Structure formats: structure tokens, C-alpha cells
Amino acid sequence: MDPNTHTTTSPTEQVRVAFGRWVLQRTGVASDEIQETMLIRQGCYCGKRLSCQGFSGVWFVEEGQIKLLGPDGHSYGTVGIAAFMQQSNDSPTQKAA
């Protein structure tokens, strides 16, 4: 999946592509290897954890937020999911050589 050209349909796919772009902006390397883990709290679905190249995004679906973490555990902050996806679409991306 090329995060620059992929057409999305579902909210999950849109977040996945935005996360891939976010990682690409930090590493300069595109990757198809985004791992997903469902998050369950007290028996109820609460979101997903996306991981790629050591970076993580913890998407809290009900709260509409994503917490972004670097490979060393550094927090890049928590942002609203709509703003995160818009920033991902607006930011210039580096293409791998």
C-alpha cells in the first residue's frame, strides 16, 4: 500500500493510511508493514494500536483521538483523529529513493 496514492473507504482504512503517512514523514521510508492490535477495555472494544517501524499510534475510537509514540516511547502527543488525518493529507511527504 502506497500511503500517497491509496484510495480509502472505511474510517479504519483512512486512519491506517494517515498513520502510514505520519511514519513516512518521520522516517522517509514507506512501509506496507503496519501491524494492528485491537484494544479491549473491560470486555468492550475501545480502539486499535497501529505499529510500524517502531512508531505506534493508539487510536481511541470513542474519544476520537490518537496518541502518537516514537520508537523510544517518546510521546508526540494526543490529537483529534480528524485533525490527524487532515495534517497527514496536508503535510508534504518524503519519497523513498
Image (cartoon, rainbow, N blue to C red):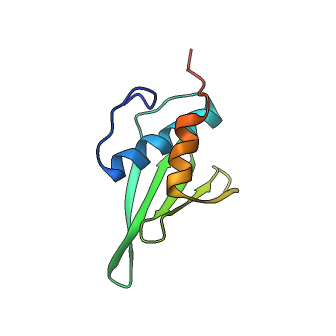
Relative to residue 95, is residue 36 depicted above or below?
Answer: below
* Residue 79 percent coordinates (x, y): 60, 59
At x 48% / y 71%, what residue is drawn?
63
Q: Which of these two is toward me, 90 or 76?
A: 90
Answer left or right for 39 relative to 58: left
- Classify residue 39 by image quadrant: bottom left
At x 50% / y 56%, what residue is drawn?
81
Relative to residue 97, is residue 2 depicted above or below?
Answer: below
Answer left or right for 9 relative to 51: left
At x 56% / y 20%, what residue is drawn?
96
* Residue 70 percent coordinates (x, y): 64, 50
* Residue 82 percent coordinates (x, y): 50, 53
At x 33% / y 79%, what residue is drawn?
44
Q: Which of these two is toward me, 13 or 35?
A: 13
* Residue 41 percent coordinates (x, y): 40, 79
Q: Which of these two is toward me, 80 or 97?
A: 80
Say whether residue 34 is visible: no
Q: Which of these two is toward me, 84 or 39?
A: 84
Q: Quadrant of the N terminus?
A: top left
Say whether residue 13 is visible: yes
- Can you name the residue that lies furthest to the top here? 97
Answer left or right for 65 relative to 70: left
Q: Quadrant of the C terminus?
A: top right
- Can you name the residue that lies furthest to the bottom here? 42
- Classify residue 7 by image quadrant: top left
